[in-house]
Image (tube, helix red, strand yellow):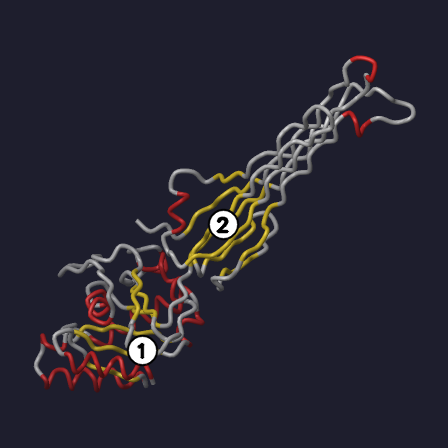
Amino acid sequence: MLIDEVEITLKAGHGGPGRVSFNPGKKSGPNGGNGGKGGDIYVSVTSDLRALNQFSKTKLSEAENGQMGGNFQKSGRDGKDLEIILPLGTELTDLKTGEKMILDDLNFRILICKGGLGGRGNFEMRSSKMTTPMYAQKGLSGEERFFKVELKFIADFGLIGLPNAGKSSLLNELTAANAKIADYPFTTLEPNLGVIKSLPAGRQVIADIPGLIEGAAEGKGLGIKFLKHIEKVKLLLHVVPADSENIVKNYQVVRKELEKYNPELIEKPEMIILTKTDLVDKKQVKEKINKLKKFKKKVLPVSIHDWDSLKELEESLVK
């Protein structure tokens, strides 16, 4: 199961307490060392889209606390830093301040929670008025922040359409993906990604989104939950099956749900892919292409059993 949205708590380490101790014998005097600094928390980025699955059991990540100061003015050990690795395309929203961060670079690394400073031991607490302090500082708390974490795929192309339109089959044929397929709706329960290796670098990643149904914007079906994954794609590939009884309505239902979810989505460049053309005769294919042309989009007939049609699709994506 792909976790693509979660709320987490990140807590940097607490500073270690200073120590109260004294030299023995004639040299008696305070010698308590300072506590170590609490560990920091950093966020970095990975291409592993399942990295959010690390939060399937726990939603709290804590850096190590600093250690208590030692005798003879020895400082306690600093707590170990913690690195949280999140998928490329993740959007972090601070639930307290509303601040947003988008992780769109694999080289991205940022300090997100500072560890608390260690407390001073009684050696540093001494003064002219208090030469033998019997106390030390406790150390400071590390930063604690609460985040909503959302994965939004950074794909070049997004496959959209009604359930059982042939999106996953097309993804499997174009890429090395192994998306589950079957002849019934809602086979795809989570988004799938594939890479079309024959395309130029930077224009290769294609996302298959679970099928939308009428009323998806009101919570029906599965697809609306995953539409955030195509908000950043360069080109929408709207899949419409050639064996659909009402091909125009089929197309319009999805467009309507896109607009309800985010009006900007219907402004994106779009190509209509007429799939399953092997299931109807050539005359019907031509008729359905003509019906779809009224939407003033490029319409491309494709069958996963027709290699030439798949190559034509790849060439169109290059253009």
Kind of residue at badge 2: Lys
Q: Are marks 1 and 2 in contact (CB under 8 Å)?
A: no
Instruction: Name the residue: 32% across, 86% down.
Output: 296
Residue 174 at x, y percent in the picture? 23, 72
In the rendered view, tell whether residue 269 sits above or below residue 63. Answer: below
Q: Specify the quadrant of the image occupied by residue 129.
A: top right
Of residue 267 and residue 32, the one placed in the foreground of this image is: 32
Left-right relation of 212 to 70:
left
Instruction: Name the residue: 81% across, 28% down.
Output: 125
Residue 30 at x, y percent in the picture? 79, 21
Badge 1, how many Cα within 10 Å: few under 14, some, many 20+? some
Of residue 275 and residue 205, the one placed in the foreground of this image is: 205
Local secondary structure at mark 1: loop
In the rendered view, tell whether residue 258 sits above or below residue 149. Answer: below
Q: How many marks?
A: 2
Of marks 1 and 2, the one in the foreground: 1
Kind of residue at badge 1: Leu
Instruction: Name the residue: 77% across, 18% down.
Output: 23
Residue 89 at x, y percent in the picture? 44, 61
Where the C terminus falls, by quadrant? bottom left
Of residue 27 and residue 205, the one placed in the foreground of this image is: 27
Residue 45 at x, y percent in the picture? 47, 57
Q: Which mark is residue 148?
A: 2
Of the two numbered discs 1 and 2 on the same chain, state the one appearing first in sequence. 2
Instruction: Name the residue: 8% across, 81% down.
Output: 281
Q: Which mark is residue 199?
A: 1
In the rendered view, tell whether residue 219 sits above or below residue 76. Answer: below
Q: CA distance from mark 1 to mark 2?
A: 35 Å
Q: Specify the quadrant of the image occupied by residue 268.
A: bottom left
Badge 2, how many Cα within 10 Å: few under 14, some, many 20+? some
Left-right relation of 286 to 1:
left
Local secondary structure at mark 2: strand
